[in-house]
Image (cartoon, helix red, strand yellow):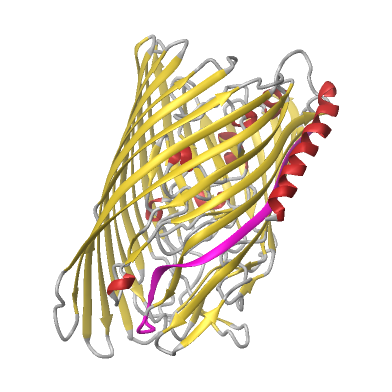
Amino acid sequence: MNFKYILLLLFLFTIVSTSIKADNIHEGGDSVIIRYTGKEVVIESFKQNNNLYIQPVAASLLTGKEIKDFNIINIKEITSLAPNLFIPDYGSKMTSPAYIRGIGSHRNAPSVGLYVDGVPYFDRSTFDININDIDRIEVLRGPQGTIYGRNTMGGIINVFTKSPFKYKETNVNLTAGNYNNYQTALSHYGNVNNKVGYALSGNYLHSGGYFKNKTTGKKADPIDAVSTRARLSWRIQPNLLMHLIMSYEYSDQDGYPYRLFHKDTGKIDEVNYNAHSYYRRNMSTNGLNLEYITDQYKLSSQTSFQYYDGKQGLDQDFTPQDLYYVDFYQRQQMYSQEFNIKSLKDDSRYSWQFGLFGFHQNYFQTNDTDNRTANNHTLQTAKNPTGGFAAYHQSAINDIFTEGLSLLVGIRYDWEQTKSTMNRTTPKETEPTVNDKTSFSQVTPKASVEYKFNKDGLAYFSVAKGYKTGGFNNTAEKDEDRIFDPEYSWSYEIGSKAGFLNNLLFFDMSLFYINWENQQISQTKTSGKGFIIKNAGKSVSKGIEVSAQVNPLRNLSFQLAYGYTNAKYKEHKDYNAATGETTVYDDNYLPMVPQNTLSVSGKYTFDINQKWLDNITLNAQYIGAGKLYWTDNNDISQDYYGLFNSMISFAKKDFSIDLWAKNIGGKEYVSYYFSTSSQHYVQKGKPFTCGMNMNLKF
């Protein structure tokens, strides 16, 4: 607990040191943060007031221009671009576990939330989305339960599509690269008298795959994906707006290029299995947002519906032999409704917001395991309908005791009920249907103290409780293992944000300490075959995050994002009933958590101003992560690794050509690891890739 006192002392030190420099920051009454970062438009989402850069929260913002400059295609590629953010590549779109500050989950419900245009994505099978031609991505680090609720212990990833009131254009994008990578994208944004706005976009992606399967002689991981988005915005009255957002995606992927890993020697075999493995996903996401805006407040309603179904076929033995094969099917229907009212006068001494949230989620899955050596099947089906509601409030009181000192407090109450209906048929019998239900409730408070320096910088100290809901183990072998309880965390954080040297430098730093209790941990079943979730752990995660941007010249800029996380178990024991042994993991590092994340990028634009060419832009980027452990034992790990990426763009008015390359030098690393009862498997990271983009805007 001494670390919390250190945080408080650093907070006081930050106030003193920043106040000494404040006179050199302010100029002309404008906000250096907004001018410096080039975000002239105030970023405002459904629940957040003002620009994130002047809020007492650790946050990173990736603009659409930055996403294009980094040649980012999907959500997994934002790893390390925000400090302490890590999204490993599982091998297919079926699951995308996200980790922030060491908080995450790779087997059950996510611990990091994802929202797209205010629509919640509750299941990690929906996380891996195409982010072509979007407006921005916000990454909020630390517990966000007061405003966002369940399953946001680690933080929130907010994705925003382009508004037709802000953009009026048609974009055509063509991409071609090695490994038979192709992408075609088309989008159109328009509005009529700034009253009715409309947007349509479509994207087709094909990848020929990166890794060859020795048995079949074909690539193990090709993918074809089609996605569409539509948006209708209507200014019904001057104070009343409506936004209707619809999206659909279909993907057909031959995933899982897993290789046998020999733990004793470190040798990695080739991809080598016989049965066709794949994952196909249909997903439709829809949202209706209504906003009534006055000079005093904004009243919002967000109605959402998401449907997806996914089917997986998996050669579970990953060998050329016909041993085990699994067919897995999952389907979700998720409905949610949220009402939010918040004050808009940020220059007043008091600001507030209230909200109500409700949801219902239908979830169905089947798991058909084919033991081909014994010629028998085990079929299991499960239904897990879940519903809940929440109420929350947040208040901010400004200029307490002295000008610039503010207090923010918030509280949220969540209640939900979940049910389980499970059927299991083995080669010997059809077991009786198991029905069960349970409910959970939780109060999550938050408080922060903030000190602003002439609107150009701030320092803050915050305390927040995190909460992740409990649930069912549908494959439990004992009644007492069927339900696992919620987990909790208390997070302590200090941070500071400021601009320096007349807009030359913007600097953002935060330190955090997280106490994580009743932790939901994957443990071995009684039979020794498979895993279930148990509340069996207690951990502490602490670290530092630094972001900086430097503009030494008009056409030259540099960006830095660095995060350090020290996340260890304090109490974690795993009893294996099959062997009668108990393994103690106390003081081991948490798996799937890189101790360091690093992103360094630079950009320079040459002004040509010729008839055939306006400018040439050079982008260079370095991304690193590690060291990280893959197991609770800490016996298998991935050392720190770094990847070099680059892009050179040639632009003439609204036409540009980009030449890009990723993983220059072909750095080899392991992107994912898992084990069965007797074998270990890894997936390698993507090799060197290069290609060309052609972009036309009119």
The answer to whether residue 418 of the structure is visible from this angle is yes
- Residue at 80 percent of width and 38 percent of height: 13
What is the quadrant of residue 496 in the picture?
top right
- Up-down relation of residue 458 to residue 291 (above or below): below
- Up-down relation of residue 677 to residue 439 (above or below): below
Residue 114 covered by magenta stretch: no
- Residue at 44 percent of width and 80 percent of height: 676
Is 70 displayed left or right of 2 in the figure? left
Q: Nearer the viewer, residue 611 or 108?
A: 108
Is 18 displayed left or right of 129 in the figure? right
Q: Residue furthest front?
A: 401
Give the magenta range. Answer: 526-553
Is 477 displayed left or right of 140 in the figure? left
Residue 113: % across, % down: 46, 47
Residue 117: % across, % down: 42, 34
Locate the N terminus and report the quarter of the image it occupies: bottom right
Q: Nearer the viewer, residue 585 or 593?
A: 585
- Up-down relation of residue 127 to residue 317 (above or below): above
Residue 530 covered by magenta stretch: yes
Residue 94: % across, % down: 39, 60
